[in-house]
Image: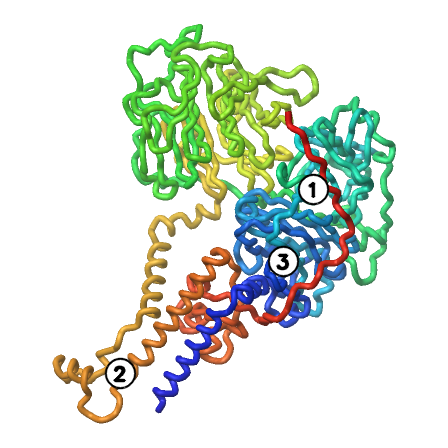
Amino acid sequence: MGSLICTIVLLALIFQGNCLGSRSPLSVFKRYQENYWPPSNECARTRRSAASADAQNFTINIGMPGVTPEASDSYFCISVRAPREDTYIVDFQPHASMNTVHHMLLYGCRSPFSTDNYWDCGGVQGTCQDTANILYAWARNAPPTKLPRGVGFKVGSDAGITHFVLQIHYGDVAAFRDNHKDCSGVSLKMTSKPQPLIAGMYLLMSVDTVILPGKKVVNADISCMYRKYPIYPFAFRTHTHRLGKVVSGYRVRDGKWTLIGRQSPQLPQAFYPVNNAVDIRYGDTVAARCVFTGEGKTSTTYIGSTSADEMCNFYIMYYMDAKQAVPYMSCMQGGNSDMFRNIPEEANIPIPVSPEEMMMMMHGHGPHPDPKVVKEDSVLQQPKREEEEVLDQGYHLEEMTNWPGADLQLGQVSGLALDSNNNLVIFHRGDHKWGVNSFDKQRIYQQQGSGPIQQSTILVMNPVKGKVLGSSGRNLFYMPHGISTDTNDNYWVTDVALHQVFKLGKNGEEKPLLVLGQAFQPGSDTHHFCQPTDVAVDPVSGNFYVSDGYCNSRIMKFSPEGKYIMQWGAGSAQMHRPIQFNVPHSLAFVPDRRELCVADRENGRIQCFIAESGEFVKEIKHNEFGGEVFAVSYVPEHGGLMYTVNGESVYGQLAPLQGFMMNYSSGEILDTFSPDSQDFRMPHDIVVTRDGTVYVGDATTDTVLKFVSSEKAEHRSVKKDGIEVHEIEEMETIIQAKLKPQPKVQELPNEIPQEVKKKNLVKPDTPGVSPAIITSLLLIPLVVLVSIAVFIRWRKTRMYGEGTEKLDSSSSGGILGKLRGKGSGGLNLGNFFASHKGYSRKGFDRLSTEGSDQEKDDEEATDSETEEYSAPQPPVSSSS
């Protein structure tokens, strides 16, 4: 009787699982959207409907899952996967109170920093691992941001946004003295219907402003010529830290300044409607001014991301025709002093903010302290990690002395690169060496008779194990120098003896796909190079740039097919006659800013330019470089980090040979590093992975050194010993044990012979039901049940992608509750197995179905509120 009841219960579970699996796609899609909203009962009241009747319009709710910050100025983030197919955000609806939340920022990116339920994103962990594109901002008492009708932010895989990351800043935690849980967030009204107008963001940002202590007024000016299809601004946002008084943005056309927006950055830093209906067209200038004061300061303030630094940002939210849409643009070029003499006087007049407003910005609730006793450091604390996230000061790189495990046979290591799988690509010179007799005074290679290098000059290595995965480049090169990869993993290399640039296939084909320059013939025209040093490839356009090099000291730009486009020389940081390049030795393309940075070796500096036009942007130079900068690399993480290595100067050893990690915007050195196993002799090239692993190739010691963060270095022995692999194998064993249980034959008395046991399994001697049969009857439905769960998961993946968010479910109601999760509509094997001693829940959450805590299949999306703006259709542009 007991076994019959158990069987009935299991069959009921199967029936319920089948019911869930057979729900309409619309109901499943609703649950997919609803499970983004927090499951906490305290948060349930703020939930909204998730889909309309036709399923074309829906809402994604993003909110904190009931958090209680314990410290003031806490920054919490939560990520949500965006729909995989192209969709459009057409409205934002904030759910937050000024009594609790200081501000919210919504970002779009491909790789969130974490996939946890939520995480602290105010320290080393930031918002996104790749470029974080701001989509929305809310601050206390600020008006809501409304998109014009027919305008939408495009998201999805094709748009480069696969995840939303919501960052919430909790300024003062006095509101949480009662330990209540916060569920603040934002609802995104979305549609799958293509919008005729695409929303975008244009950021104007100063990168080199210096605010001297005690100086009453300091202006930061930014301006760029606009050279794209027309855009139509409809909202703006200003951002500085506590020294900013007013920020203004303009369009300049034929000498006339038209205001886009003007605001005090000490007021809520949300998006405000533009002041005038204005368009920006090809040939216009986009300009902005931030007014600062250094009064009351005792030290110099620079541009940076910490609360001790300053920022000058003017955001323009615009729309443009979908056919020519460019969703994100930026301008970081200093303004021309002559042009800014004509800026309207309003840009120089601070917008007063009362002490009470300042206190509301800081706290927003409770009694206001006396403004007279507010110290400078406590006034309007700004986020440490907002548009630009920097590493914690405790971050440090250390050498992995046990890498690589194999004894590599390398010659002079001249170049390093990474392929799309994060494998390390090494370019070395085999048995050829660059010595004093290698070239004559005309830069002609003197050892042609020895023939090309017979060894493989290009090696592909596993970045973890240090094993060689592939090799190529035999009998092609005489004196290798630089190497880069493109999005298709082709190799772009230079040879200073041949004076040529090569494009090689990723599969190791010995025949080059493209060759530029004449073999062994140096020159300075557009068809020749003279000891070219490096190549950088634009991942979007395919255009490539060559640093040329030891003789010509120029940067050359070519089309993907190798057609010459333009060239330029050095820029000037002092607005005087520029100091020309002296061996532009290494290149780094900065994709998120569309810039090209050059390691100007003998001048001991890094210079950056707008890649499209070659316009000078900035220069980074430090005394610590010691007079020479050999190589440069860039990663967009933490707001942009620049890595470089220095070299021994011709004037002698002026500074230790080491690597440098810098904040790209401010140029500030965040960390220096050098090997423990040996000294740097000639660190010739450097490359950095997105997770911060650094590789340096030394051309004198013929070695490649690997550096990781000190935190990773502490655990490297664990990884080396294979403990992680053992844990994975153990987990697979647990899964097999639970998903494929076997009949326990040993349950029969041990003294019964094997043939009798077999007979008993087939036909019992005594009346009643055999325990083995009962076991089988109980286990077979369980296997079927698990199969159904896997099938539901598979079907969900097919419909909505792999990244649907999992619920934070808990046990409820015995085995049934553990399998389904509290109030959920699906199965959660993770909860079930995790409830048994000795088992880990790791790996099981992915089997959860998409049940929400409170399914409301009959709810429909409400109509959006009346739009504040009506976007006029842009005129059709004629092309010539």
Residue 30: percent from the left, percent from the top? 57, 64
Residue annotated with mark 1: 319
Secondary structure under badge 3? strand
Name the residue rendered at 47%, 21% in the picture.
562
Nearest to viewer (mark 2 / mark 1): 1
Mark-to-mark CA distance, 2 and 3? 52 Å
Residue 639: percent from the left, percent from the top? 60, 41
Name the residue rendered at 26%, 83% in the picture.
773
- Of the residues shown, which amino acid type is indicated by label 2? Ile
Quarter that holds the N terminus:
bottom left
Secondary structure under badge 1? strand
Residue annotated with mark 3: 57
- Of the residues shown, which amino acid type is indicated by label 1? Tyr
Circle 1 residues within 10 Å: few <14, some 14–19, many ≥20:
many
Residue 657: percent from the left, percent from the top? 49, 28
Q: Is residue 69 left or right of residue 695?
A: right
Residue annotated with mark 2: 773
